[in-house]
Each structure stands twice: as C-alpha cells, then as structure tokens.
C-alpha cells in the first residue's frame, strides 16, 4: 500500500499559502522582525518570525471568534488549502483528522491563567478559555471543515507535527482510514518566548543554523497540513499525487529534558529507520530539511547524526534548515518542514539555510547558502522535541520507493497486529496499585451508580496522599513536577507488573508511551506566567519551563524509565485517557512499535477547578458548600504489547483489545458495530463517568444487558477517570472476575469504546515474561 | 559571609529541588557542577536566575559563570563583591 499526499497547505511567517511560502523560501527571504504581538521586555531577543495580517475574526465562524486562537486560525487556513488542493471535503467520504501542537490558545489565555492563579476563587471564565486546551485546534477545524470520522490531537513538543503524520500513516496502513488531514499549528505566545529566553536558547539576532557563531534559535509560528490518502483512495477519485509518504520513524532518546544526546545516536537511528521503512538507500535521498534550530547543542548533534545515518552518501546530500527563514515554529515545525521538503521535491529546487555564513566545522555537511535547482527523487525531514522525541519522515516521487514488503499495489491493508494488555497500574485514592489491584475501584460508593450499595468507602480526596519519595527516586526525578511524578509512579508499577522492571538506563528501550492530560500541566503554566508577568521575564524559571509542554509527563517518564519507543501525548478533554489508549492501539496494530504505555494523568489544579472544568465539564458535581467543583487527581497507565512481542518473551498478557472505536460528533448508534459479549460470557461495562448519553448508547448496543460500573465516585472526578476505568477493567479481567469488558469513554461530542477480553489465566507461580531487550536488568 | 553561604546553600537545595539533601550536606569548597553535586547546565541557568532574584546580583554567563559556580565559596564571594560594589548595598 502506497500513501499519497494529494494536497498541502501552509501558513507561514513568509506568506499565507504553500506556493507563496515556497517562492519566498527559494528567494532567500527571512521573516524576522521585532515582535508586535506582545511586549518582550527582559527577554534575550525582540525578534521573531510572526504571521502577519492574520485576523482570527476573518477565519472563525460568525460569533465564534472569541473562543478561537491565532493557532486555530492558522490551522484552519492551512487545512482548508490542503483540502482544496486535494479536491476533497469531509462530505466526499470518511475523512480523519490528526493535529499536532504545543501551545494552542496559550497567547489568548495566559493573562487569564496568571490572574486566576493570583486570585483563585474570584476569577470567572470567559469565552477565551475555550481555546486553551490543546484539543481546541482540532475541535475548531472540525467545526468548519468537518465532520471528521476520527480526530486526534498529539504532542511531542517540537516533533508534534511530524508525529501527527506518522499517526495518519498508521491509520491508513491499518485500514482504519482512507483519507487523513494531518498537520500541526502553533502560535507565538509569551510563555514560549519567555521560556526559551530563560533557557538561554534564544538568539538576540535572527538565528544562524549550523553557523560557527550561532547563538540560539529564533521563534516563529505557523501551520501546515497535508491530505494523506491511500493510493487506492486517490485513484478512485482521479486525484494526482504531489508525492508519496514513504518512510517514517519516531523514537525517544530518554536522555535529558532539554539537552539532546551529544552523540546523536537516536536521531541517527530514526533517520536510518525511516529510510529502511521506505526501502531506500541513503544515496537515493537528495535533500534533507534539517531540524537545525541554531542552538549550539542541536546543530552539532544533528550534523553528527546525519553523518552517521547517511555514511558516505552524506557528501551528495543537500541539507538546509528553514528556521533561518521562518524561525522555530515549535509544534508546527515537523509538519511545516515536511511540507517544505515535499514542495522542494515537487519543484526540483532546494531552499537555502539563511543566516548561515561560516559553517561550524562540527556541522560540516553539504549546506546551501542560496537556493539550488536540482532534480530530486526522495527527501527527508527530521524533527527533535524537548525530552528527546526524535522523528524522521521520508517523502519521494510517486512510485520511486519500492512497494512495501508484503503489500502489492492495490492490495488490502496489511493485517493489523493483535494488541494485548500485559499490565496496568493506577495512582489513586488507594495508592499506587498494580494490575489486579485496579479492580478495587469497581467497589461502588454507597448510593451511587447503578450497581447498588456496598461497604462504606470514603469519597476520593481532592489531592491524593501521594508521596513521591515512597515510589520513585526523587533525586533522579528532581526536575519532574507532580504530574510527571504521578505518571512515573504508574509507569514504574506497570512495567514491573509486565515483567519489564526494575527500571534502569537500558530497561524498556523498546517501549513507547502515549499519555496525556486534558489540560496539560496547567498549574505549572499558571505559576510560570504569573511570575514573569509580575517580576519580569528575567525571572522566568528555566527549570520549570520544560514542564509546561503538554507532553512533559510522558517525556519525563521516558527519561526516568528509559523508554525509547515513540513518546507522545494525546489530548481529548474528558476522554483524554481513552484517546491515548486508542492512539496506542492504532500505532501498535499498524506495526509502529512493539510495546506502549498508554493512559493519562491529571493533577488537582486551581486552574481546572476554577476555570477549565466549569467550561468543559459543567455537568460534574460541585461542592455545595463552596459552589466550586470538588475534583481529584490521578494517573492510570496500561502496558500494551503486540501479540508477537509478548510471545517472544514468553508472556500471554492479561487481556486482548478486541475492539477499539473512536468517533466524533453524535452518531446515531456508535456502538452498533460491537458484537455481543457471547453466550455465557461474564461481561460488564465500565466507565469513568456514567451518564444519560452513555446509557442511551448502551441501550441500543449488544451490550445492553451487561452490568454497568462507574469508577468516578471511587477515584474522584477528573479527566483521568477514564484511565482508571480502563485499569479497573484490566484488573477484573486479570483476577478472573469477568471474561469480557466494554469500556466506554465520552466527552463533549466525542467518544471511545474498547472491548477487552480476558486471556488464559497465567498461574501466579508461573514463569514471568522475559524483559523486552537483551540488555535489560 | 557565613550567613551568605548558608543562604546560598538553602537556595541551591530549594531551587534545584535537591530532595533528600540538606544545606548542611553541601561542602563550601566542593564543585557544584559535574562531579560534585552532579548539577548540569539547566541547573546553572536556574541557579543564576534565582541568585539574581534573591540577591539582586547578576551572574555572568558562559565561561565566566564557570568560576562563579565553582563552589559555594566562589558563589558567595561573587555575590559579596557585587553587593559591595553596588551603591547603597
């Protein structure tokens, strides 16, 4: 199966539109100017590459502009262009949407965050806050370009956009989708500008990638989307390909939260793996659009990685970084730079690295000082994110790459891999619990839920009595905030239960992670913004800044636990845990990785309590005495593995994911495709929160007769409750209580459903599965 | 000077989240970075920011920072000298 890109859209600081942007890139133009969006006093730089002449009100639907961010508007313009060029709409057949990003509506909401942090309890939400969650951009796109069948929001800091394209490839290859609109958008904001300044990573002048005198990055903003579809889908509607998405790979360095691995080992690995995926030799790639941030550490690491991955072919490989022209567009960069690479391929012309005057000998490569015409067969784009999330993409002329092994042209998609659950762990009111322990949350609170009364169980506390030092090495985790520590504790327990512990530097190198929080690490963002607004940008905390990235809990977990697979976060409001599980299942079944920790983590937060929850989950109960919500926190992670991976180390798993559904909007009967539990099967339905909508869906499903359990009264009200429901279901299956469980997760106009089936019960005294890698332990 | 050293040690423990360490564990002369406390470049940035915030004394960047961050003694000497040089200190 070949994957074709049939449309590309770009909003960049150089121009609105892919063609105009590429014209200016090839002309060597730079977009840097003193920033006009906000005051930069106290920062190391005043310049940035800003998207000019963008008015949110011109893009947002009438009456909705107040709840749209600049990021949303850029995304909408780029996405519309991609669809237009491809000649499709969401009404021409099922269309999926994958969006990467990091800041979403931060610019529009950061002053509000500071204010509500300063005066908790008195601040009242405004419509602006609608643009704050990372998933807001996908929701904005759906409102004007939808309906989309499947929608996902992912983050891995500065490789987010590239990973959105990998997710699209996974959906297409497993047959879940035929057409995907995938890309990313990220707008400038005070938080990132101040944060990169505090890190000393920002140049006072327009940046100079790979230059001997480079002294840091320049920030930019923008959006890029691509319409990616199967060759069969495009042919069926007579569409021409712009290029083929032929190869990709994503891995985590598990090294340091801000500094890249000096050797470039993992970066080289993803480049080689992406080439292998495409079936291409290094010498067949004519151009590499580098990450090239112009920081001292990135550029020398990256040059070393390129030399490792390309070997002797590096002499002929043209390399340039677009960041010398459009700046570092952070979450959008992976998509924007892949789009630029694709356009270079189409136009047989390679843009230069502007700002580069004298090449640093450590960065010796075939750099371009001016644009160069050259016929290209294949190109690569690479992206590296905070926490060491490395991704490489390979694009080529249609038909240039060999047909992927095991697939004939026009053949049906490869058979999806079977996905098993080998362990689960929770951090909740009952402490840190392993696989079987999670079932404790199925014991109902008296008077709640449809299952009736039981022994007295205390309600969940707002803040867990979680002491990090009891569960992890706090010296190693000293930079990790509370959210990250909750995630690490759950990850450590799940890995140990799954036979992949104890943790160490080389343990679990083959394991990835997909987990998120509905609102990111929100309290840390509030505190960070409030401090620099009050005391000045000079006093922004460099050590805190990396914790503000939405993917920071998984990034920290990766570093702490040595997870070297694909590490991303997934965000979808009240269904965030379910979105992460769905993403993990979709990646594994498509052959992206062998094992993944999936779930979510949510912290008790003033900002969520006061501002975000009232907007996004007004139906949750509030505390009568204070008039405010009474929300808890927690973390839940499932260890998923492909059947082949688990079998190779002698494990059978505790459950199989036999169905994984995701939908958007309000389809008539989203559960209609689920088969009945089977005659005589002991079956149950488990949800984080059970409501009338869920009840009506279940009534119209083959699972209507199964008993229903709601875990939120036991685990507390928070967006990770769905993860606790998944872990509780796994616990009950592991304990032999049920044969089959349907886990239902619903949020505002979105839903997920999973059917988990028990595996043969392994005897408690039986052999433990072997570690994933030979060098473990 | 002794008081300043103690304040700096408390600042180091607090700002760099050295849980499990107390100010008394930090030797006046031991190197802060690399082999000593095992701190890295991100800690250096955080500490420089915190020293300026707390004592109103900027810490130089780059190579010059190396000498200032050599030890608690060196850092204390830098802060004391900068304060003495500043009018009204």
Image (tube, grey):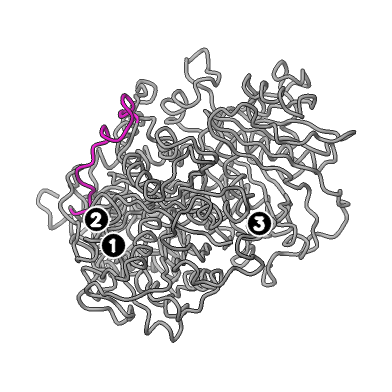
Q: Do tags 3 and 2 sit on the same chain? A: yes
Which residue is under mark 1? A323
Instruction: Return the x and y of residue A745 as percentages of the image width and height.
Output: 62, 33
For the point 77% across and 18% down, the residue is: A452
* Letter of the chain that mark 2 sits on in the rendering: A
Q: Split into 4 quadrants, where in the image is the N terminus of chain A?
A: bottom right
Which of the two residues, A623 or B78, is positioned nearer the viewer here? A623
- Which residue matches tag 2? A20
Chain for mark 3?
A: A
Closer mark to the observer between disc 2 and disc 1: 2
Which image quadrant is residue A32 in? bottom left
**Residue A455 is one of the magenta-drawn residues:** no
Q: CA distance from mark 3 to mark 1?
A: 40 Å
Q: Nearer the viewer, residue B42 or A52?
A: A52
Residue A50 drawn above or below residue A109: below
User: Considering depth in this image, is A579 or B16 the residue closer to the camera?
Assistant: A579
């Amino acid at each position: 199966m070949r994957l074709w890109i049939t449309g590309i859209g770009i909003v960049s600081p150089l121009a609105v539109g892919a063609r105009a942007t590429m014209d200016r890139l090839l002309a060597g133009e730079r977009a840097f100017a003193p920033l006009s969006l906000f005051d930069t006093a106290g920062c190391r730089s005043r310049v940035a590459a800003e998207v000019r002449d963008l008015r949110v009100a011109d893009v947002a639907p009438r009456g909705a502009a107040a709840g749209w961010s600049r990021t949303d508007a850029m995304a909408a313009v780029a996405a519309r262009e991609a669809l237009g060029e491809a000649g499709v709409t969401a009404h021409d057949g099922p269309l999926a949407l994958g969006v990467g990003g990091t800041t979403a509506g931060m610019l529009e909401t950061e002053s509000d965050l500071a204010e509500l942090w300063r005066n908790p309890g008195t601040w009242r939400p405004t419509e602006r806050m609608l643009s704050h969650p990372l998933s807001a951009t996908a929701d904005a796109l759906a409102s004007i370009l939808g309906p989309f069948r499947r929608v996902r929001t992912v983050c891995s800091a500065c490789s987010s956009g590239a990973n959105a394209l990998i997710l699209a490839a996974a959906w297409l290859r497993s047959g879940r989708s035929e057409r995907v609109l995938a890309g990313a958008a990220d707008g400038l904001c005070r938080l990132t500008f101040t944060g990169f300044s505090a890190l000393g990573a920002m140049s006072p002048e327009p940046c100079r990638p790979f230059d001997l005198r480079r002294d840091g990055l320049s920030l930019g903003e923008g959006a890029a989307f691509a319409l990616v579809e199967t060759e069969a889908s495009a042919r069926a509607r007579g569409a021409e390909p712009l290029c083929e998405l032929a190869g990709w790979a994503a891995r985590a360095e598990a090294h340091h939260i801000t500094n890249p691995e000096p050797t470039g080992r993992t970066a080289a690995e993803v480049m080689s793996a992406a080439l292998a995926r495409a079936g291409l030799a290094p010498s067949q790639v004519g151009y590499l659009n580098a990450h090239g941030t112009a920081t001292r550490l990135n550029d020398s690491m990256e040059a070393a990685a390129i030399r490792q991955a390309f070997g002797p072919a590096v002499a002929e490989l043209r390399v340039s970084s677009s960041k010398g022209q459009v700046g570092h567009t952070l979450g959008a960069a992976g998509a924007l730079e892949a789009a630029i690479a694709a356009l270079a391929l189409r136009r047989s012309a390679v843009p230069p690295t502007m700002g580069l005057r004298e090449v640093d000998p450590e960065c010796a490569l075939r750099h371009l000082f001016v644009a160069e015409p050259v016929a290209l067969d294949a190109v690569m784009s690479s992206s590296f994110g905070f926490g060491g999330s490395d991704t490489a993409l390979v694009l080529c002329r249609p038909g240039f790459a060999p047909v992927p092994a095991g697939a004939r042209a026009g053949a049906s998609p490869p058979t999806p891999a079977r996905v098993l659950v080998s362990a689960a762990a929770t951090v909740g009111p009952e402490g840190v619990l392993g696989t079987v322990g999670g079932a404790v949350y199925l014991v109902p609170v008296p008077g709640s839920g449809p299952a009736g009364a039981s022994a007295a169980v205390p309600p969940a506390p707002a803040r867990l009595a979680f002491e990090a030092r009891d569960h992890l090495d706090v010296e190693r985790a000293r930079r990790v905030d509370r959210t990250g520590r909750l995630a690490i504790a759950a990850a450590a327990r799940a890995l140990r239960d799954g036979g992949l512990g104890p943790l160490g530097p080389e343990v679990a190198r083959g394991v990835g992670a997909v987990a998120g929080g509905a609102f990111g690490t929100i309290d840390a963002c509030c505190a960070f913004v409030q401090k620099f607004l009050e005391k000045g940008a000079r006093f922004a905390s460099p050590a805190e800044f990396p914790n503000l990235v939405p993917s920071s809990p998984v990034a920290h977990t990766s570093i702490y636990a040595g997870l070297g697979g694909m590490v991303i976060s997934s965000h979808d409001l009240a269904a965030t845990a379910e979105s992460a599980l769905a993403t993990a299942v979709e990646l594994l079944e498509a052959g992206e990785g062998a094992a993944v920790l999936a779930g979510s983590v949510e912290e008790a937060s003033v900002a969520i309590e006061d501002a975000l929850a009232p907007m996004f989950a007004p139906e949750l109960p509030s505390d009568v005495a204070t008039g405010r919500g009474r929300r808890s926190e927690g973390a839940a992670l499932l260890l998923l593995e492909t059947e082949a991976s688990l079998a190779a180390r002698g494990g059978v798993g505790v459950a199989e994911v036999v169905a994984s559904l995701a939908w958007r909007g309000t389809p008539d009967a989203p559960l209609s495709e689920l088969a009945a539990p089977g005659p005589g099967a002991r079956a149950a339905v488990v949800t984080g929160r059970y409501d009338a909508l869920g009840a009506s869906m279940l009534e119209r499903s083959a699972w209507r007769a199964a008993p229903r359990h709601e875990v939120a009264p036991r685990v507390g009200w928070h967006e990770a409750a769905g993860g606790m429901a998944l872990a509780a279901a796994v616990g009950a299956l592991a304990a032999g209580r049920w044969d089959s469980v349907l886990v239902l997760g619903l949020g505002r106009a979105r839903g997920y459903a999973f059917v988990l089936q028990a595996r043969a019960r392994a005897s408690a005294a039986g052999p433990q599965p072997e570690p994933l890698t030979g060098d473990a332990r | 000077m002794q008081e300043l050293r103690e304040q700096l040690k408390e600042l180091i423990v607090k700002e760099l989240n050295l849980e499990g360490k107390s100010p008394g564990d930090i030797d006046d002369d031991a190197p802060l970075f690399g082999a000593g406390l095992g701190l890295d470049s991100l800690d250096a940035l955080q500490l420089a920011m915190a020293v300026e915030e707390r004592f109103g004394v900027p810490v130089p960047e780059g190579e010059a920072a190396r000498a200032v961050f050599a030890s608690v003694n060196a850092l204390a000497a830098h802060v004391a000298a900068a304060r003495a040089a500043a009018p009204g200190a």
